[in-house]
């Protein structure tokens, strides 16, 4: 029996962990039977650290030492506007470290955001191990699709500190798509509309059997249900101030209670037309007068309050369709993910934007963790079975056009002119492109064969047309289908491991003269991806080059997220212009940037180090977490304690 | 693992090694296995087909780290091909580059091409200005460009040029360089020959004589 694998949805408000048990994805529960782990970490006066459900109660009694929604801070430098905005609204405290990293005040210690998230991940690991009665180290951890390199790298670091072996940082919508389409033998285009507590993402994917290709992704990492809570919180605070002359913003404890009340009311309004907020003796005003809040919110009022936030999601949807070169009506299914999609307003708006009813039969809270577990199993070579009740569509191999996916009735007449069967590739009729390599029938009566290996004789053959490309040196018959590769190997019969083809959500750029950003890897490029650029020394005997790197879509460098600097050192002393260094930027399958460099003339590998802004390197890597369910301690083997 | 699977795997391994070695001699069209006039849909399907086979995730259980890295490098080149051919402006620029024997698209290559077309510069490669990226199109990319610039005029130079191609096929790069130097001696202004010579020198440096 192989080691268990975990899929972890590390959410802004709540986290979920799933595994593959007996071949099927399964969400794990804590000892109380709960599947949602609140993403809350509290520093108790005794020195222990409370996590998850244990920490939630502390939000009200110890708000200054209880951290929630840390995901909104992860991978951001202290000076970041979003971080500043968030920190100005929460009762806990933070300050800037030496490298602009955010340090959260955890009683008499300061903690980085990855360390804080590590508590949560460690807690999740402990819950999973209890449920499984086994050690579990290997995990796929999900992040919003629009997370940048720094946010992904910080999440990875959190996983390592938590004692996990992070197999992959996976995009949440992609994970959701996997859980939705895995083993279903779909041949359809889906859009994942993922509106969570802190972030919004939209991803358009083509699913062909076991192949999941992301066509485009877009998102906003600072747009979620939390913002709706804040809007309602502001209304309540204003009401207290106007009617009773009391400003709750002065007391973090009261503010914490109000925030909770606002969130509860928001959730209730998803099911009821009105929600009552009743907070007695919330605080004491001048002369010991008790301040209480009794208020009723109706759905219409709340919807007006947050309408513009919902509207913003559709601007992002437009952006994704533009990127993919597609129209909103060219989608076969809309899948809702994330707790905020429970709101009736969101569902109605989604339905009118896409002109079809969204798919609502999957649990928007669990689907991401389940998809992550499926991907973890796939990466470990474990064969997961098709989830029970979800039999793969049986298809008659002789049917000419593949059966159309089931669609809501009202959209039947607006059937988009999507993909038609393509012409077969010249000279490769049974090659990996034409049939055997594609897991789904393409309307040519090909039996769908789940396949892991190619038709060997076909791939390397240069297609006939290539000979006319006119480029010298490429008219080679590189690897002819010689006798050794005539016989086609058969893949193992049961292999149905899904393959995810994802993209990088943001353009990677380097700073140029004049403060511009030159795009090295454009957004929406499939990963893993690499691109190179050559740098020439501009001064005599120059021995180092510093390249500033950013992610984002603005032409102006500083308007993007500045990731940091790439430092090339130890260049040979030579007249200017004589040393040229080829720098290769690579974005891996987790969306994390690597760089390498070599001297163009000597071919010698050059040292290239990326120094990320807002990340503390070195000593803090040695941090480890120990403890029992819900109560932990962090120890740093380096002894560097960062005490205040 | 059954014996036949093991045999298949070993053949796969050999093939991957070969493909990896040829990485710098394959155009994006070669890498994806599509004709140069392939439409977007065909290119996408080719990419999907390649991915099913060559995506690094399909090879995580491959024991040798060195082979895994080769597969990964090969696949990164395939994503590069898909990225460039999937964007009309980049693809047009790439077709112009390909016509002069440049097999990889890069911002510098596009800049150099633009400079060359305006007659401003004749430098090979390099010339990395720090200016913003030259607009993808670089004009036309039409049939003439696809043919590889102006044809070689003299019979002698053309013969030498053709012989050098044969040498490259046989991996005799040193000989190819000599032949192309002679051809350039006959027809010093031919861009086709000078580009082929650059390429042959690069191959020679990479693989030895």
Image (cartoon, rainbow, N blue to C red):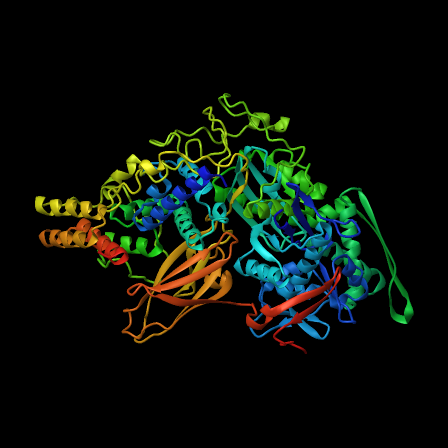
Percent x, y for residue B86?
41, 43
Instruction: Kindly indicate the quadrant of the structure image that contains residue A69.
Output: bottom right
Of B134 and A503, the residue lying toward us: A503
Quarter holding the C terminus of chain B? bottom left
Instruction: Kindly indicate the quadrant of the structure image that contains residue B32.
Output: top left
In this view, A408 is above or below A302 = above
Of A40 and A346, the residue lying toward us: A40
| Side of A190 relative to B39 (left or right) | right
Percent x, y for residue A332?
57, 33
Image mark count: 0
| Side of B50 relative to A184 (left or right) | left
Percent x, y for residue A259?
76, 58
Of A272 and A394, the residue lying toward us: A394
| Side of A183 relative to A293 (left or right) | left
Asked if residue A363 shows in the view, the reply is yes
Q: Which residue is drawn at 46% across and 49% down?
A: A525
In this view, B37 is above or below B68 = above
Q: Which residue is farthest front? A: B3
Q: Which residue is drawn at 70% across and 70% down?
A: A93
Percent x, y for residue B83?
41, 46
| Side of A122 relative to A260 (left or right) | left
Q: Which residue is farthest bottom? A: A644
Of A425 and B53, the residue lying toward us: B53
In this view, A399 is above or below A216 = above
Asked if residue A247 shows in the view, the reply is no
């Amino acid at each position: 029996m192989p080691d268990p694998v975990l899929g972890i949805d590390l959410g802004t408000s709540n986290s979920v962990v799933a595994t593959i048990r007996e071949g099927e994805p399964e969400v794990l529960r804590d000892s109380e039977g709960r599947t949602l782990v609140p993403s809350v970490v509290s520093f108790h006066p005794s020195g222990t650290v409370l996590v998850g459900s244990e920490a939630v109660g502390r939000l009200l009694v110890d708000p200054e030492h209880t951290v929630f929604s840390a995901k909104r801070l992860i991978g951001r430098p202290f000076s970041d506007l979003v971080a500043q905005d968030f920190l100005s609204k929460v009762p806990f405290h933070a300050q800037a470290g030496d490298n602009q990293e955010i340090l959260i005040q955890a009683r008499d210690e300061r903690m980085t955001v990855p360390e804080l998230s590590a508590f949560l991940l460690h807690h999740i690991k402990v819950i999973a191990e209890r449920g499984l009665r086994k050690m579990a180290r290997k995990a796929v951890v999900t992040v919003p699709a629009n997370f940048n390199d720094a946010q992904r790298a910080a999440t990875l670091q959190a996983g390592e500190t938590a004692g996990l072996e992070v197999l992959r940082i996976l995009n949440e919508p992609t994970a959701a798509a996997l859980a939705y389409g895995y083993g279903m033998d779909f041949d359809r285009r889906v859009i994942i509309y993922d509106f969570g507590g802190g972030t919004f993402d939209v991803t358009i994917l083509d699913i062909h059997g076991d192949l999941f290709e992301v066509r485009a992704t877009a998102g906003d990492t600072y747009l979620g249900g939390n913002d709706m809570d804040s809007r309602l919180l502001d209304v309540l605070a204003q009401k207290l101030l106007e009617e009773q002359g009391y400003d709750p913003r002065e007391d973090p404890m009261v503010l914490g209670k109000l925030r909770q009340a606002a969130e509860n009311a928001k959730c209730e309004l998803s099911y009821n037309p009105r929600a009552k907020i009743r907070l007695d003796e919330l605080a004491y005003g001048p002369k010991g007068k008790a301040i209480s809040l009794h208020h009723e919110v109706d759905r219409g009022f709340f919807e007006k309050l947050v309408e513009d936030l919902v509207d913003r999601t559709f601007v992002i949807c437009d952006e994704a369709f533009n990127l993919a070169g597609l129209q909103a009506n060219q989608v076969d299914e809309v899948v809702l993910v994330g707790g905020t999609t429970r709101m009736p307003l969101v569902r109605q708006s989604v339905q009118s934007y896409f002109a079809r009813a969204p798919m609502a039969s999957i649990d928007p809270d669990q689907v991401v963790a389940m998809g992550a577990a499926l991907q973890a199993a796939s990466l470990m070579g474990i064969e997961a079975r098709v989830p029970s009740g979800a039999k793969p569509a049986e298809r008659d191999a002789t049917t000419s056009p593949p059966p159309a996916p089931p669609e809501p009735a009202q959209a039947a007449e607006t059937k988009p002119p999507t993909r038609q069967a393509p012409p077969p590739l010249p000279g490769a009729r049974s090659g990996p492109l034409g049939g055997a390599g594609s897991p789904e029938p393409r309307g040519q009566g090909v039996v769908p064969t789940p396949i892991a290996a190619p038709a060997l004789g076909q791939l390397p053959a240069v297609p006939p047309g290539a000979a006319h490309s006119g480029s010298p040196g490429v008219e080679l018959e590189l690897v002819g289908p010689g006798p050794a590769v005539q016989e086609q190997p058969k893949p193992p019969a049961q292999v149905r491991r899904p393959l995810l083809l994802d993209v990088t959500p943001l353009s990677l750029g380097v700073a140029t003269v004049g403060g511009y950003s030159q795009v090295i890897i454009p957004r929406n490029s499939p990963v893993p991806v690499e691109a190179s650029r050559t740098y020439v020394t501009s001064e005599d005997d120059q021995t180092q080059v510093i390249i500033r790197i950013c992610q984002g879509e603005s032409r102006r460098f500083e308007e993007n997220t500045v990731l940091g600097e790439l430092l090339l050192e130890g260049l040979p002393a030579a007249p200017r212009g004589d040393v040229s260094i080829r720098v290769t930027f690579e974005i891996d399958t987790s969306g994390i940037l690597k760089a390498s460099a070599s001297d163009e003339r000597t071919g010698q590998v050059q040292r290239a180090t990326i120094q990320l802004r807002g990340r503390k390197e070195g000593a803090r890597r040695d941090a480890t977490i120990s403890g029992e369910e819900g109560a932990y301690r962090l120890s740093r083997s380096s002894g560097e304690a960062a005490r205040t | 693992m059954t014996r036949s699977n093991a045999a298949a795997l070993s053949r796969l391994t050999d093939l991957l090694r070969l493909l990896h070695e040829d990485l710098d001699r394959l155009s994006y069209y070669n890498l994806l296995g599509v004709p140069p006039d392939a439409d977007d849909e065909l290119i996408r399907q080719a990419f999907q087909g390649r991915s099913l086979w060559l995506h690094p995730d399909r090879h995580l259980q491959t024991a040798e780290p060195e082979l895994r890295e080769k597969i990964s490098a090969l696949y990164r080149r395939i994503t590069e091909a898909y990225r460039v051919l999937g964007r009309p402006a980049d693809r047009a620029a790439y077709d112009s580059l390909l016509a002069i024997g440049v097999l990889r698209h890069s911002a510098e290559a596009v800049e150099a091409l633009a400079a060359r077309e305006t007659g401003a510069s004749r430098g090979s490669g390099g010339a990395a200005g720090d200016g913003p990226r030259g607009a993808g199109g670089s004009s036309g990319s039409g049939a003439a460009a696809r043919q590889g610039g102006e044809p070689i005029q003299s019979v002698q130079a053309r013969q030498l040029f053709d012989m050098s191609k044969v040498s490259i096929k046989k991996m005799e790069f040193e000989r190819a360089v000599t032949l192309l130097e002679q051809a350039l001696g006959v027809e010093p202004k031919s861009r086709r020959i000078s580009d082929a010579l650059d390429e042959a020198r690069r191959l020679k440096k990479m693989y030895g004589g």
